[in-house]
Image (cartoon, rainbow, N blue to C red):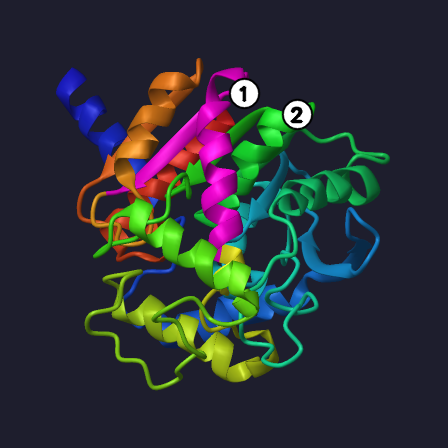
Amino acid sequence: MRRILLLIVAVCVAVAEHATAIPEQEYAPNYARTVLPFLSSGKRFSFRSADGVTKLQGIRFLHPDAKGKIVVLNGSTESWLKYGELFYDLYHNGYSVISYDHRGQGLSPHLVRANSQIGQIDNFDLYAADLNALLQQVIMPGNHEKLYLLAHSMGGGVALDYLERYSSPFQAVVLSAPMLRINTAPYPESVTRLLIALLNNAGMGDHYAPGKHDYDPAEPFDGNSITSSRNRWEANQLVWKSHPDAALGGPSINWVDQAMTRTALIRKNLPTIKDNILMLQAGKDQLVMCPDQDMACRMIPDAHLVKFPDSKHEILMERDEIRDHALGQILEFFNN
């Protein structure tokens, strides 16, 4: 009898976990039928950047009986436009969701006038300051929900920077493939830093970093560095084809210079973080360095690491068996 009960529980857990995501089988019609209408139902908003120079663009989905509110921070060159499936899953698991586009990317104003596809940042510190501005202007006034933070890649670096420099209101924080150190392969980091500094000092900060270029709508799935899910890759490409003004190519020389300098400081200050953190690591990550994530979980007093050995950088855009597991870990972490 006990074995039967355990089997029933295991099956229920497996079904519930898989039900959190749109399956890859017949993905495109399911995405069009469920995710896109849901994404369109969100309430768009804008708020003043931390320095008051610009307005950043966001979206929110308010659940009528929310367990809490999840702030989603996207990565470099991204937009909330590509996170519809994640928003859909979080909302239908009982959470309100709010997200926005960082300065210089997505639907927020881009910063390089000569070429709006170049990812630029005037001061990397302003990313965390903008998150604080969102909290102070939009979320905290009148808020009665528990707050959670879910951040990907560069957003993960921004989240850690925020937690080190501000008083955190979050119950728990999940970091997916956080950017603690950029992968500079095939060149050593020291060589890359020297080259970037020389180019930046020569007045080329607004130009693409070496090897980077405008968004290529014809970029093939094979050999991509972000996901092994062709269906989710194709859905992501449709986002940029449908919203070309939101698309970015690669980062600028100045962005890389700022990012390398700031992440070094973030790594140094990790022991000051007091928040409860779950970190998801992509074992096949080509964009950020995994060893620094291991180190971070040793340095942060209350941090837990879950590894996905077969995942590329975008864990929450991966094929079902990876994505469902990751989403299950996130929901369990927040639900507790």
- Was residue 122 drawn as part of the magenta stretch in this picture? no
Q: Which mark is residue 168?
A: 2
Relative to residue 174, is residue 320 depicted above or below?
below
x then y, percent, for residue 297: 36, 23
Q: In the rendered view, does 25 fall on the left or right side of 210?
A: left
Residue 225, located in which quarter of the rendered image?
Answer: bottom left
Query: Which amino acid lies under the numbered mark 1 shown in the image of this protein?
Result: Asp
- Which residues are drawn in magenta? 256-282
Label 2: which secondary element: loop
Residue sitting at 64 percent across and 27 percent down? Answer: 165
Q: First in sequence, mark 2 or 1: give its number.
A: 2
Work out which quarter of the rendered image holds the N terminus and state it.
top left
Q: Could you tell me if residue 12 is visible in this image?
A: no
In the rendered structure, are the residues bearing label 2 and label 1 in contact, judged by CB atoms less than 8 Å apart? yes
x then y, percent, for residue 9: 27, 28
Q: Which mark is residue 237?
A: none
Query: Which amino acid lies under the numbered mark 2 shown in the image of this protein?
Result: Ser
- Closest to the observer: 120 or 20? 120
Q: Which residue is mark 1?
A: 275
Q: Residue furthest bottom?
A: 218
x then y, percent, for residue 69: 64, 38
x then y, percent, for residue 100: 65, 55
Q: In the rendered view, does 65 fall on the left or right side of 30?
A: right
Q: CA distance from mark 2 to mark 1?
A: 8 Å
Q: In the rendered view, does 333 fall on the left or right side of 15?
A: right
Residue sitting at 50 percent across and 28 percent down? Answer: 335
Residue sitting at 18 percent across and 48 percent down? Answer: 310
Relative to residue 149, is residue 182 depicted above or below?
below
Residue sitting at 53 percent across and 20 percent down? Answer: 273
